Image (cartoon, rainbow, N blue to C red):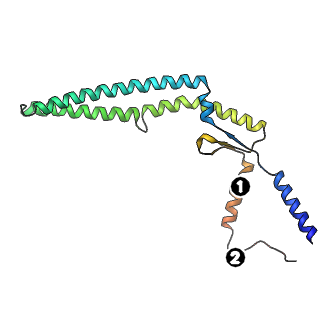
Amino acid sequence: MKSFKFAFLVVFLLSGFTFAQKIGVVDTNYILSKLPQYKEAEGRLNAQIKAWEEEVQKLQSEYETKKTAFENEKVLLVGDHYKQREQEVQELDKKIKELITNRFGTDGELTKVRANLTKPFQDQIWNAIKTVSEKNALGIVLDKSNNISVLFLEKRYDYTDKVLDLLIKPEGKTPNTKKK
């Protein structure tokens, strides 16, 4: 009986080793930092960001000047002149806020330009990871720079359905076990 248990344990351990998955880890941020084309594209993006920031600063300076002049002169302004100057200041403030949102907001130009910039590089890295994983028979590839996100997983290594089957198994039913 003891030899049977020992043999079962050995077979179980060996089968675990045979079915073990090979896992690979990559750091995509490091890869990007080493690509000269990405550095060049990133430099162009930074130049565009600087130009947009200068545009916003120019408008903010103009706004501050108009607002200060309006505050200093509003006691002298009457009727339509007062309303016109106040409206000019408010419209300039609104224009600045819209510009900032359109350029730097979550759906702004910066987000779109950055996505367009990185997409070709991400595609290249993905294709390289896929090639390396196939060549080295990797079942799972993790990205170190993305808080260990899974980048590649073959369907045969996906155990989602088996876990789901265990979770939805009717209560009260247990596997058949034989006591000896």
Q: Quadrant of residue 82?
A: top left
Q: Position of residue 36 (x, y in %)?
A: 60, 23
Q: Residue at x 62, y 35 (%)?
A: 28
Q: Can you give x and y, in whole percent of width and height, for residue 40 in the image?
A: 54, 22
Helix, strand or loop under label 2: loop
**Rendered location of residue 110, percent (x, y):** 44, 31
Q: Residue at x 82, y 52 (%)?
A: 17
Q: Quadrant of the C terminus?
A: bottom right
> In the rendered image, which quarter contains the N terminus?
bottom right
Residue 79 or residue 141, whichever sits in front: 141
List x then y, in percent, for residue 20.
Answer: 79, 51
How packed is label 1: few (under 14 Cα within 10 Å), some, or many (20 or more)? few
Mark 1 to mark 2 CA distance (whole Å): 23 Å
Give the residue number, with chain letter if any, for mark 2: 172
- The residue that mark 1 highlights is 159
Q: Residue furthest bottom?
A: 180
* Contact flag, marks 1 and 2 (Cβ < 8 Å): no
